[in-house]
Image: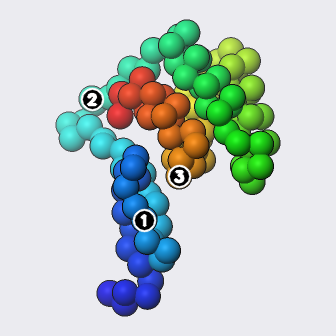
């Protein structure tokens, strides 16, 4: 591997990433077929999602997109659509350190 290309590293709160590295998100998947994670879509998850929307800095390039997505999630009535939007929020927000605490709460509530 050419060192100029960097390497893919997992997101580590408080860790460091080199200028050529890419931040990825590791999501462990069930190893046996038919086993999944049941997501409880309730107040605790909604509060963590709201926290993400409130904590994203105004000057961040993704701020408007994140806040719109947070609003869409909080008003979504269909459970499956809500979970899909939450997963999208997690993927968008995974590399933004200012909202890392809120994203980590959401991923824990999603069972990751």
The C terminus - image quarter: top left
The N terminus - image quarter: bottom left
Q: With respect to residue 41, does 1 lie above or below?
A: below
**Which is nearer the N-term, disc 3 or disc 1?**
1
- Residue visible at 65% across and 33% down? 55
Whole-percent x, y for residue 109 in the image:
42, 23
The reply to whether callout 2 and callout 3 are in contact (CB within 8 Å) is: no
- Residue visible at 38% across and 73% down? 7
Mark 1 or 2: in front is 1
**Which quarter of the figure has residue 54?**
top right
The answer to whether any part of residue 84 appears in the image is no
Q: Which residue is mark 3?
A: 95
Answer left or right for 37 relative to 82. Answer: left
Residue 46's disc is none
Q: Which residue is mark 2?
A: 35
Q: With respect to residue 61, does 47 lie above or below?
A: above
Q: CA distance from mark 2 to mark 3?
A: 28 Å
Mark 2 or 3: in front is 3
**Which is nearer the N-term, disc 1 or disc 2?**
1
- In the image, 60 versus 41, the foreground residue is 60
**Which is nearer the N-term, disc 2 or disc 3?**
2
**Which quarter of the figure has residue 30?**
top left
As helix, strand or loop, the secondary structure at mark 1 comes to: loop
Q: With respect to residue 16, does 13 lie above or below?
A: above
- Residue visible at 74% across and 27% down? 72
As helix, strand or loop, the secondary structure at mark 3 comes to: loop
Q: Which residue is mark 1?
A: 17
As helix, strand or loop, the secondary structure at mark 2 comes to: loop
Which residue is most to the left? 32
């Amino acid at each position: 591997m050419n060192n100029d290309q960097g390497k893919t590293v997992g997101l580590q709160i408080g860790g460091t990433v080199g200028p050529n590295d890419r931040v990825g998100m590791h999501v462990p998947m069930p190893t046996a077929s038919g086993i999944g994670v049941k997501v409880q879509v309730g107040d605790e998850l909604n509060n963590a999602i709201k926290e993400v929307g409130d904590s994203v800095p105004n000057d961040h390039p993704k701020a408007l997109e994140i806040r719109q997505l947070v609003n869409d999630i909080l008003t979504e009535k269909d459970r499956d659509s809500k979970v899909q939007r939450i997963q999208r929020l997690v993927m968008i927000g995974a590399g933004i350190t200012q909202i890392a605490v809120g994203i980590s709460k959401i991923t824990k509530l999603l069972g990751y």
